Image (cartoon, rainbow, N blue to C red):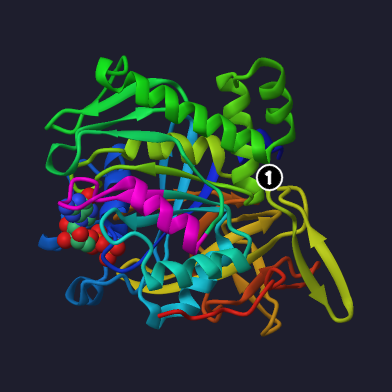
Amino acid sequence: MRINLDTLAVVRNLGILAHVDAGKTTVTERILYATGTTHRRGEVHDGTTVTDFDPQERDRGITIFAAAVSCAWDGHRINLIDTPGHVDFADEVERSLRVLDGAVAVFDAVAGVEPQSESVWRQADRYGVPRIAFVNKLDRAGADLDTAVESIRERLHPAPLVLQLPIGTEDAFRGVVDLVHLRALTWTDGGDMVVADIPEDLREEARRRRRLLEEGVAELHPAALEEFCMRSTLDTRTLVDALRDLTRTGDAVVVLCGSAYRNRGIEPLLDAVVAYLPSPLDVPPVRGTLGDTRQERPADPAAPFAALVFKVNATPTGRLTYLRVYSGTIEKGDMVMDAGARRGERVGRILRVQADRHAQLDRAVAGDIVAVVGLKSARAGSTLCAPDAPLVLEPPSVAEPVVSVA
Ligand code: GDP
């Protein structure tokens, strides 16, 4: 069996990180809607949201159990891993962070950076997760993108690069100027995106902000600097390439904005996820140990199988074990080894969870996030591996202790 490595390049393992109430559930819901995964719009307040399908979660109104949901956007597969925003579930947040390749950090446009957004941000720093910032709730009274960006600069990251200029403020917020592709994106009341020329009255300001963006990028990216010095401007292609590099290295964080509740800003956010955040091929190989020896495992379907269990859920379908496959391939019926417990387990069905539906797969390959039915003992944090190539996956190297600001 040959699996094309190119298919891994179109996978994005994505988490949404936020302070409670910033709008993580609503953003997730709108992403599922925009990608056609759900055909109705769930609302947080009527208990119909798709990712929060555990009744206990609905009752408490906070996301307790991380569920991974797959959706498709522009030829890419986005595996959306729900990370709990509540500080009481820090272990679970950390486990989710291990299996992500990139994240969207959601902020409230009125409150800006809040204590919990700061602590989750620091955890993501420790795990080296590249991020995009989404300033949500731009429709609220008192919402201000510039102030929110300043709070990101002061409290989280010295180099926020703003990719959009809002069109209309507060209740009249109706769209954004896309400063990268120099066009206006507005949304109808029905939620459809309309692409148009930049309105006359915003052209001057859009030019000024594009210039600021180009200067910001040139300051941080050598190839962009070279072009900027030669031509006093940056080509859109150069700009996009540099934004991708800077996002992946963590040298800058791109900032987008919108109102998830009003369904404004989700499509450009998905475009940015695809354009700037890494695929499983773009992140360093995972490391593991076997006795005294350390090994690296590349994101290669032909390498020995190794996966991390990040969530186990009891559901009507059975015990669902969510895995991130780091290397190799597993097929239905394979024996795998729970490396810590040194116990063999048989893989029953392999499922790709799509909101509240499950698609059955014959196999899962490196880079993928799936749920497996039939594993009895594996727990969150367990490594599963090929019985003839055992190893225990190591957490990524931890750069600094977590400082809890809350
Ligand atoms: P979470 O706790 O981060 O998951 O936040 P939720 O998605 O549950 O949203 C918290 C509250 O903010 C809910 O009442 C949402 O309806 C509301 N909300 C979410 N997004 C927006 C938005 O863009 N604008 C406004 N005005 N309210 C929003």
For residue 52, side relative to residue 283 (left or right): left
Which x, y percent locates residue 148? 36, 53
Choose top left, top right, bottom left or bottom right for residue 202: top left
Q: Which residues are magenta?
A: 134-156
Choose top left, top right, bottom left or bottom right for residue 315: bottom left
Determine if the magenta segment contains residue 138. Answer: yes
Q: Residue sitting at 58 percent across and 77 percent down?
A: 381
Q: Is residue 377 above or below residue 332?
A: below
Q: Is residue 236 visible?
A: yes
| Residue type marked 1 | Leu
Q: Is residue 52 visible?
A: no
The secondary element bearing badge 1 is classed as helix
- The quarter of the rendered structure image containing the N terminus is top right
Which x, y percent locates residue 145? 33, 46
> In the displayed image of the protein, which residue is found farthest to the right?
293
Q: Which residue is mark 1?
A: 281
Q: Residue sitting at 73 percent across and 48 percent down?
A: 300
